[in-house]
Image: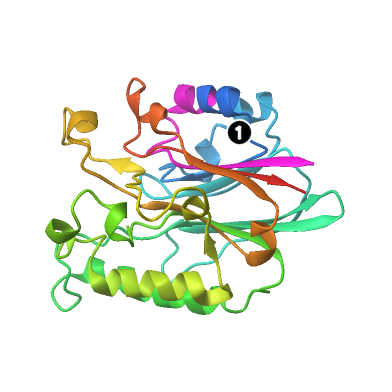
């Protein structure tokens, strides 16, 4: 059985519901993970997704900010939401899905952006980001390593020098600082996750998923960062057939500043 997973920071589901419908029709995912839905649960457009076949929808949203969602056409065995740093701010949701006779675990994260100043002593937002990563790492260490598990989302860190347009110029910019990269690597190693995108795109290749709205000619300047990720366990890596960033979506009208990520698996 072929299973397609799509992850996207949609940057407001109500603003971009038509783009979401277009994404679903174009890419036909079995599982869609959204970040920054910016929508309280009671106002979530459940019907729009249900009409497109994604009838099992689970959301963790708050008004105006953050928010995550997983929608799927697969049977759901278990749902979990985890709060970190004592905040109920809509940054995690996980589902356990039934795929044939297998259990497939999906963790969808929206990691704090961290503000502008990369110093936890003077920037509470940056401190929150680092603390969040520590707590999320501890949480994931409790999960089984020998399982079909994916961790996806906007992790707000571009770890490798070819995940940013300029390694030297961004070393002191939040999202690419050494302390953030170190925390992200520890998070990734929690249950020995593999970076699925880099299984299909070598580290020598520049790879971005986000381009700032501030750049009018974003595609020409191409000052991107790979802030979005799909990590998979060793077991899941044995059945992956594709991993990609769908840059074309960033070219659509009224786009999110992030492009969707896709991973295909053959169970």
**Left or right position of 81 against 171:** right
Picture mark count = 1
Image point (61%, 30%), residue name: 49
Give the camera-side residue of 157 and 52.
157
Q: Can residue 154 be seen in this view?
A: yes
Res. 85 in view: no
Give how far across and how far down residue 253 sits, in percent. Answer: 34, 20
Asked if the stretch drawn in magenta spans residue 3, the answer is: yes
Q: Residues within 10 Å of mark 1 (few under 14, many from 20)?
A: some
Residue wearing tag 1: 46
Q: In this view, does 131 lie above or below 265?
A: below
- Residue 64's quadrant in the figure? top left
Coordinates of residue 176 in the picture (x, y in percent): 25, 62
Q: Seen in the image, is 135 located left or right of residue 127?
A: right
Q: Is residue 178 left or right of residue 251?
A: left
Check disc 1 and report its element: helix, strand or loop.
helix
The one nearer the camera, 94 or 215, is 215
Residue 264: image quadrant is top right
Magenta segment: 1-21
Residue visible at 13% across and 74% down? 122
Asked whether 149 or 85 is in front, the reply is 149
**Image point (32%, 43%), residue name:** 210
Pick whichever, 52 or 249, lies toward us. 249
Question: In the image, is 237 to the left or to the right of 153?
Answer: right
Magenta-drawn stretch contains 108: no
Residue 78 is situated, as x and y percent measured from the top left of the image, at 73, 59
Residue 182 lies, in percent from the top left, at: 34, 75
Q: How is the image coloured?
A: rainbow
Quadrant for the N terminus in the image: top right
């Amino acid at each position: 059985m072929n299973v397609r997973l799509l992850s996207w920071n949609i940057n407001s589901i109500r603003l971009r519901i038509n783009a979401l419908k277009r994404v679903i029709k174009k890419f036909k995912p079995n599982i869609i993970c959204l970040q920054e839905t910016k929508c309280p649960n009671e106002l979530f457009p459940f019907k729009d997704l249900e009409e497109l076949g994604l009838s099992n929808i689970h959301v963790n949203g708050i008004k105006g900010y953050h928010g995550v969602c997983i929608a799927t056409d697969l049977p759901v065995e278990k749902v979990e939401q985890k709060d970190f740093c004592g905040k109920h701010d809509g940054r995690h949701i996980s589902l356990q899905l039934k795929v044939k006779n297998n259990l497939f675990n999906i963790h969808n994260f929206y990691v704090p952006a961290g503000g502008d100043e990369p110093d936890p002593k003077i920037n509470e937002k940056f401190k929150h980001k680092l603390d969040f990563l520590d707590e999320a790492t501890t949480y994931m260490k409790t999960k089984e390593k020998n399982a079909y598990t994916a961790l996806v989302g906007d992790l707000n860190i571009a770890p490798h020098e070819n995940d940013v347009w300029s390694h030297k110029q961004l070393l002191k910019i939040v999202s690419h600082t050494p302390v953030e990269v170190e925390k992200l690597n520890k998070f990734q190693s929690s249950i020995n996750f593999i970076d699925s995108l880099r299984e299909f795109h070598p580290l020598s290749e520049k790879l971005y998923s986000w381009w700032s709205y501030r750049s009018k000619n974003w595609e020409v300047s191409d000052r991107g960062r790979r802030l979005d990720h799909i990590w998979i366990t060793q077991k899941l890596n044995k059945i992956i057939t594709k991993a990609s960033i769908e840059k074309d979506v960033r070219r659509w009208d009224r786009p999110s500043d992030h492009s969707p990520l896709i991973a295909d698996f053959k169970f």
